[in-house]
Amino acid sequence: MGYSSLNCSTIERVSIGNFATPNVQTPSGQGDAGKIRINFGAGGNTDNNEFSVDPDGTINCLKNSIQYEFDVVVRVERQGNPGNAEIMGRLMYAEDGIEGNAIQFGDTFNIRIDDDNTVWREEFLLKLSPKIGSKLWFELAIDESGVNAGQLGATQPTGTLSSWNPVNTASLDIGYYKTK
């Protein structure tokens, strides 16, 4: 009895849009009232207009969709104010496109920073099949259980490193998987 050859395909990730900003983003205070929507720069559309990303960070689903992967990286920092800073983040999803009807999708991330000169990298990797007309966005807040000291920020290259690309405080890569 002989062996037949197997046709194994490989899976690859296809990126359809990258958005990023090196700008500092700071909550206006602690708690829900001080939360901010994380933005990813000037915004724009993905390669085939599957999504548009607004300058305020809102991700709009423009086409009937397959399962997409949203890879978000933020750099949280804290400076000043001794004590623990409790920084929280979450993804919001408005299936019907009405922000007042949004629900939290997935877990809340939490970073506790006790050093007043710390930069921390946090990554969300979410898989979602959003409906056409839906909206997604990421929020950042400082919990009231700690000190009011936290933001998205990062040290920028200087001196002999000044020709390096800037360090992004928030970046978003949207993609999907396909077989080769």
Image (cartoon, rainbow, N blue to C red):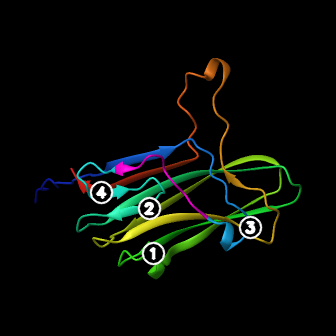
The residue singled out by tag 3 in the image is 30
Name the secondary structure under disc 2: loop
Q: Residue at x 67, y 37 (%)?
A: 155
Counting from the top left corner in percent of width and height, residue 44 is at: 35, 49
As measured in the structure, the alpha-carbon distance from the residue carrying label 3 to the one carrying label 2 is: 22 Å
User: Which residues, given as a range, are shown in magenta?
Assistant: 36-44
Q: Earlier in the sequence, mark 3 or mark 2?
A: 3
Q: Which mark is residue 58?
A: 2
Q: Quadrant of the N terminus?
A: bottom left
Amino acid type, mark 4: Tyr
The residue where tag 1 is placed is 99
Name the residue: 62% across, 51% down: 25
Q: Are marks 2 and 4 in contact (CB under 8 Å)?
A: no
Q: Categorize mark 3 by other alpha carbons within 10 Å: few (<14), some (14-19), many (20+).
A: many
Element marked by disc 1: helix
Give the left or right position of residue 56, taking residue 129 as reference.
Answer: right
Q: Give the residue type at disc 3.
A: Gln
